[in-house]
Image (cartoon, rainbow, N blue to C red):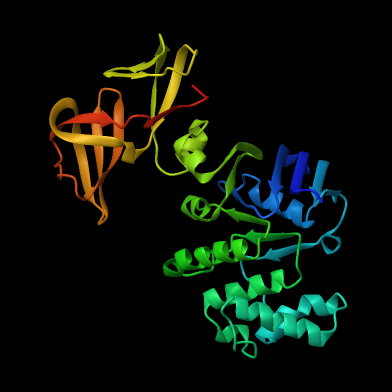
Amino acid sequence: MTDTAIEFVDVVKCYGAVTAVDTINFSISRGELVTFLGPSGCGKTTSLRLIAGLELPTSGTVRIAGEDVSTRAAPDRNVGMVFQSYALFPHMSVIENVAYGPTIRGSDKKSAIARGHEILSMLGLEGLGKRLPSELSGGQQQRVAVARAIVQQPDVLLFDEPLSNVDAKLRRRVREEIRDLQRRFNLTAVYVTHDQEEALAVSDRIIVMSNGKIAQIGTPRELYESPSSRFVADFIGDANLIEGQIENGAFRAPGLSLPLPATSRTGPAVISIRPERIVLKKSGSDGKVKSASYLGSRREYRVETAYGTLLVSAPISAPALEPGEEISVILSPGGYTLLSDA
């Protein structure tokens, strides 16, 4: 049995003259949770639908569990899907919703219900099987949707913007529950979201998409700390993008010189600096505080320098600075990344 759960090879999906997915390649291992992340229209939902069989590729190959499923429709793939709207049958009880899939696929109704109760218990929904979906909270309905998907023991479980209908205060708890379930059942899961924080919190790896192409694939830490391009740096979290030149192994901009020992490049370049990797000190001639915001757990500053305006995130324990103060700007070692596009 292959350790690769999903594989895309040169997959293209066109709708008339519009190319929604443009020659993408990736593989997902068994037991891994991978998130498609990107802005609206980037191709992430189309990619999910290509895995589900709700769309078929214009060209290229989709493999699930080592088998070519490129031409198979959704019912012929062992894939479970959790939709944005939960898609629960409102007239059916919770247990009827959960047991519905196995029953219509030919399982004995009694055994399907028994297995459904077992899954509900594992998800903390024991005793709620007779209730209607309307009698549950949003978080509970989400777990019922997950139970209905995993009761069929799918090769792959797909999540399409699963927290879009969950109250903002519940999102952190529900995403933690989803991650815990995925690990507990060792599920291969693919998750779609446009929310960067959500992607960073739940994923083993993230596939960042832009204009139908893959911009970068990596772990949450790799993408945040070592973005490859302006798009990735700016899309995942906040980033200060500074334009300059590489000369003699250093990045140079007005009032700034940073060593780049690992590069042989020369010419125009862009670096990314995360706001929390900058330290501000009272007094100095590196810049001036333009604005200051108190955000409870941290303070944010806009700082004017010779090489541009910086966004700086400072811990609440650091001395407060006021607009108009002259300050020193200190970059943490390794706190900047050379991007591939100038």
From the top left corner, tell me how far across and down residue 245 is, in percent. Answer: 41, 15
Residue that protrudes farthest toward the front in the picture: 1
Identify the residue at image location x=21%, y=41%. 291
Q: Is residue 61 left or right of residue 132?
A: right
- Is residue 312 among the parts visible in the rendering? yes
Residue that protrudes farthest toward the top in the picture: 248
From the top left corner, tell me how far across and down residue 333 is, in percent. Answer: 33, 29
Whether residue 159 is situated above or below residue 316 in the rendered picture: below
Of residue 110 and residue 61, the one placed in the foreground of this image is: 110
Identify the residue at image location x=41%, y=31%. 272
Whether residue 298 is situated above or below residue 142 in the rendered picture: above
Q: Is residue 325 left or right of residue 117?
A: left
Identify the residue at image location x=46%, y=12%. 267
Whether residue 150 is situated above or below residue 34 in the rendered picture: below
From the top left corner, tell me how far across and down residue 134 is, in percent. Answer: 58, 84
- Is residue 57 among the parts visible in the rendering? no
Whether residue 262 is situated above or below residue 80 in the rendered picture: above
From the top left corner, tell me how far across and down residue 329 is, in percent. Answer: 23, 30
Counting the numbered discs, the total is 0
Answer with the quarter of the image where residue 88 lies. Answer: bottom right
